[in-house]
Amino acid sequence: EDQVTQSPEALRLQEGESSSLNCSYTVSGLRGLFWYRQDPGKGPEFLFTLYSAGEEKEKERLKATLTKKESFLHITAPKPEDSATYLCAVQAGAGGTSYGKLTFGQGTILTVHP
Amino acid sequence: NAGVTQTPKFRVLKTGQSMTLLCAQDMNHEYMYWYRQDPGMGLRLIHYSVGEGTTAKGEVPDGYNVSRLKKQNFLLGLESAAPSQTSVYFCASIKRESTDTQYFGPGTRLTVL
């Protein structure tokens, strides 16, 4: 059974205080690992897809990295507008078909204080 | 393009009542999904569809039925609502099976009393 665990559950930062969110996973053949941002009362919004260990992707103050067991979302010099819930998800079925199905973690609630 | 839209945005039901949630996408996507999101549990897949006229069960299908009569629409039905179905429901779609980005709707908040 595919499993995704995110830590911490909640993280409070001061503006400019860099930190990382963790996503640990077990999956039968990783097809892709996804990061989403979710604002209160809205649907998840896509951030990154990582496909293989060692891969990194960046977008503004966010950088996602991937190993064979976990992924990190690094936030550099965060601003209050970065406050949101960050969701990690995996898609299994490398070498076959997964029908696009995702298994999500429970999310990390990030609050950045000015 | 409106993307993925969901109707209604909010709904309150009494135990035993039935209702249908509508998801519509205007991106000509093949695959569509219904998730529920509960506090501390992330999103869990209820049912999904890989094309018009086809549906399949996800992780938590009990108590729900779905239909995909048209490519752009995916309906989620609750025949006899229970308090355990109080949740926020999200619909999502992708163009084709791959690691394509899933596009999510804004959600429907359902309360069952």
Image: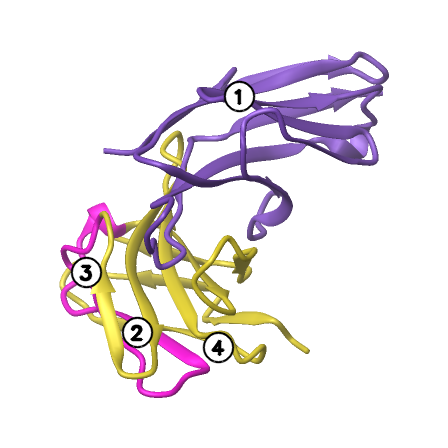
Kind of residue at disc 2: Thr
User: Does the segment drawn in magenta span residue B2?
Assistant: no
Q: Which mark is residue A67?
A: 1
Of mark 3 and mark 4, the one earlier in the sequence is: 4
Q: Which mark is residue B24?
A: 4
Q: Tell me which chain appears purple.
A: A
Q: CA distance from mark 4 to mark 2?
A: 13 Å
Residue A66 at what x, y percent from top left? Answer: 57, 25
User: Do marks 1 and 2 share a subunit?
Assistant: no
Q: Secondary structure at mark 4?
A: strand
Q: Are marks 4 and 2 in contact (CB under 8 Å)?
A: no
Q: Amino acid at mark 3?
A: Ala
Local SS, label 2: strand
Q: Secondary structure at mark 3?
A: loop
Q: Chain of mark 2?
A: B
Q: Are marks 3 and 4 in contact (CB under 8 Å)?
A: no
**A94 relative to A75 in the view: left or right:** left
Foreground: A18 or B101? B101
